[in-house]
Each structure stands twice: as structure tokens, then as C-alpha cells.
Amino acid sequence: MPSLTTDSARKPMSVFISYAHADQQYAQLLRAHLEALRRANVIEIWSDREISAGTQWAEEIDSHLRSSQIILLLISADFLASGYCYGNEAKTALGMHDAGEATVIPIIVRPCMWQSTPFAKLQVLPRDGRALTTHSNLDGTLVALAQEVRRVAESTRPAEGLDKDGLVEIQLGADFSS
């Protein structure tokens, strides 16, 4: 397994966290467990709590969502009941996933009927499909989730010198036309 040393030469994978505000405490806990990956330059994390006052929030969310390579959907009954989370963010995320533009990872936060949703076709976390809140060792479960996010980030991250489609990136440093 790769070390957690900083890899400043490679661009971090952009991670978007989608959650219902009723689940904010779980979003914060997950974010804390992902912090080691952020510090190691494996990922950069964004959620709606980073929207500045006076910003058009819907445009800001959509911009970050559409530019993310990994999208974490924190699933609960509140998420499923939210017209914005379920109807906008999850729908956009699944479209991006189906188009190969991003990897969507549903994370079951609290027990709910997620099995009848469009993202039920994806492998959920925790891998056993049980909600985070039903696990006796929440921190241990969150560590396992962070390790899964790392695996996804490193397996989908372009190799150095290649773009996201596997094409060689060429930097033109001099103008030879004269």
C-alpha cells in the first residue's frame, strides 16, 4: 500500500460530499477521516459548507459537483426526502457516473430504504450495506470508508504525465515558429 507522504507533483482527485443537512455531523466525521488523504495530496474535498456569504449557492454547488471526480452520497431517509439532494445532486452524479466522468460512492449513513433507489446498482459503503449508525465501532468503520475512497482515488487518478483519458499531456515551453 502506498505511503501517506505528500505527492505534490500530482493533482489531487476532487471529492464532492452530498448530504442532507440533518446528517451534517456524519459529513463532518467522514471529512475528518478523509483529512489524512487531503494532506497527502490524494484528494481535495468540497461540500456546501464552504459556500461564502453572498454566493449564488445553487450555481456554486453545481460547479463543484460537475468538476468532481469522486462523489460521495451520504444516504439517509433525510437525503432521500430532500428534493435537492436526491432530485438534483444524486441525479447529476449518477449521470456523470454513467458517462464515465466521475465515480459515485453511496455511503449509507442511517437506515433507510436505499435498495429501491437508482444508486442501489452501485457498490455501497459500508460494504455490508448496513448504515454507519448501526456499526458498534463508528471510527473503525469510517477508517475503512476512507481507505476505500483512497483506493478509488488512486485507481482512477491519471498516471503522471497522462490526462484523465490516458493521453500524454504535452507542455509546450518554447515557440519554435520564428
Image (cartoon, rainbow, N blue to C red):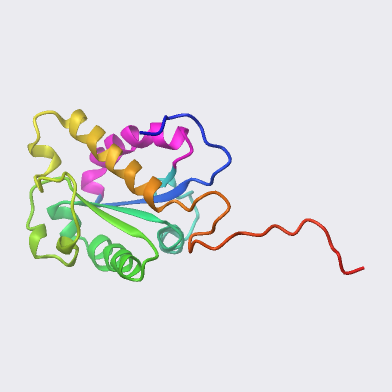
Image-quadrant location for residue 84: bottom left
Q: Is residue 110 left or right of residue 63?
A: left
Residue visible at 54% across and 44% down in the picture? 10
**For the N terminus, which image quadrant?**
top left
Is residue 114 shown in magenta? Answer: no
Residue visible at 54% across and 63% down in the picture? 167
Q: Point out residue 98 in the picture as x, y percentages from the top left corner.
A: 30, 69
Residue visible at 33% across and 44% down in the picture? 151
Judging depth in this view, the residue of 144 and 135 nearest the camera is 144
Judging depth in this view, the residue of 92 and 100 nearest the camera is 100
- Give the number of callouts: 0
**Please, what is the dominant secondary structure of the magenta stretch?**
helix
Q: Is residue 25 left or right of residue 161?
A: left
**For the C terminus, which image quadrant?**
bottom right
Is residue 32 shown in magenta? Answer: yes
Q: Point out residue 22 in the picture as x, y percentages from the top left corner.
A: 21, 47
Judging depth in this view, the residue of 102 and 47 nearest the camera is 102
Q: State the extent of the magenta-drawn residues as a range.
A: 21-42
Q: Is residue 60 left or right of residue 176?
A: left
Judging depth in this view, the residue of 145 and 151 nearest the camera is 151
Q: Point out residue 168 in the picture as x, y percentages from the top left corner.
A: 58, 60
Q: Where is 18 relative to 25, above or below?
A: below
Q: Point out residue 63 in the picture as x, y percentages from the top left corner.
A: 46, 62
Image-quadrant location for residue 162: bottom right
Residue visible at 16% across and 45% down in the picture? 109
